[in-house]
Image (cartoon, rainbow, N blue to C red):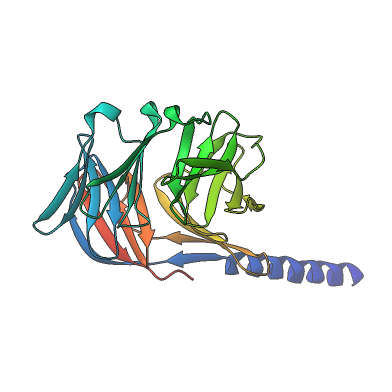
């Protein structure tokens, strides 16, 4: 009788654990709202004004209907990264030439910076727009995150040296996020405060939404991971129609999926 009771209690315990686990496994079913042909080499996304951004044959373009703006700089080689946070001042990074170009909203060059000519030695491997006329910089010479004030050509480090190589990074105006080679996730503020944000699953592509939420792809499936205020982690699979895709972008509840042939836009409300 005692053995039966113990087995019953164990069954209830196992069932409760199973229910808790299943409660954390969610599915998101986004609604396809539009799609268009993709003729770019790299599609970068949209801004709040409805313009799309792309790179084709190393030419950076901004397009909306019949409006087309273009920028190319043959002397600086291949465009490594584009920062579109501020559509009135965009950042084009040319890593091979250790240089960056700032463009206005019509893709006119505002500033060109060659970090190799800076009085303080800088070799940039990560960059992004920050606040108050500053750029986020990761300087591989000292392995530190810094801020570069481009109007004054002044550079200052804000972090201690990083002990692991950066696998992925993303910036907003106030925060430099990065994931190291061991999939540890960190953030650094403009004041140099570094926070450990946890461990990231293996991923093919990733986009950080906030310090507690991100979307990542794994084996051509999309997932949203969120950590609530109590520290409970939830992973939701985002059910899209595409079996394969090159990249994705999430902004203001619109999930854009980029394939070699199409750009598909889904309406998505995250939990």
Q: Quadrant of residue 72?
A: top left
Number of numbered discs on residues: 0
In the rendered image, is residue 15 in sight?
A: yes
Q: Nearer the viewer, residue 144 or 14?
A: 144
Give the residue displayed 79% in from the left and 66% down from the top: 10
Q: Position of residue 206 (x, y in %)?
A: 46, 49
169 displayed left or right of 157: left
Residue most extreme to the front: 152
Report the residue that reaches farthest toward the right: 2
Q: Quadrant of residue 153?
A: top left
Residue 155 vs residue 194, the one in the foreground: 155
Percent position of residue 123, x then y: 49, 30
Residue at 42%, 66% (x, y): give it.
28
Q: In this image, 189 relative to 37: left or right?
A: right
Residue 203 horizontal side relative to residue 72, left or right: right
- Which image quarter is the N terminus in? bottom right
Residue at x 32% of width, y 50% of height: 90
Determine if residue 258 is in view. no
Q: Is residue 174 above or below residue 27?
A: above
- Residue at image coords 54%, 54%: 175
Q: Position of residue 60 (x, y in %)?
A: 23, 43
30 shown above or below 163: below
User: What x and y, as percent, mark residue 32?
Assistant: 27, 65
């Amino acid at each position: 009788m005692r053995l039966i009771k113990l087995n019953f209690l164990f069954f209830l315990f196992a069932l409760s654990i199973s229910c808790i686990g299943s409660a954390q496994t969610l599915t998101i079913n986004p609604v396809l709202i539009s799609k268009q042909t993709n003729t770019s080499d790299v599609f970068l996304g949209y801004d709040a004004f409805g313009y799309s951004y792309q790179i084709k044959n190393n030419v950076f373009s901004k397009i909306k209907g019949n409006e087309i703006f273009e920028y190319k700089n043959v002397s600086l080689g291949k465009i490594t990264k584009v920062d579109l946070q501020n559509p009135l001042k965009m950042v084009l990074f040319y890593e091979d030439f250790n240089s960056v170009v700032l463009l206005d909203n019509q893709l006119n060059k505002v500033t060109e910076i060659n970090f190799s000519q800076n009085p303080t030695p800088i070799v940039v491997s990560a960059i992004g727009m920050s606040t108050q006329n500053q750029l986020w910089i990761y300087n591989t010479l000292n392995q530190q995150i810094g801020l570069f004030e481009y109007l004054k050509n002044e550079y200052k480090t804000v972090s201690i040296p990083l002990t692991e190589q950066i696998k992925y990074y993303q910036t907003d105006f106030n925060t430099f996020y990065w994931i190291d080679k061991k999939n540890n996730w960190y953030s650094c503020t403009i004041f140099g405060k570094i926070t450990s944000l946890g461990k990231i699953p293996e991923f093919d592509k990733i986009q950080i939404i906030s310090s507690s939420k991100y979307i990542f792809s794994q084996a051509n499936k999309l997932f949203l991971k969120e950590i609530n205020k109590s520290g409970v982690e939830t992973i939701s699979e985002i059910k899209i129609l595409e079996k394969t895709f090159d990249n994705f972008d999430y902004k203001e509840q619109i999930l854009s999926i980029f394939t070699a042939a199409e750009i598909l836009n889904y309406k998505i409300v995250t939990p």
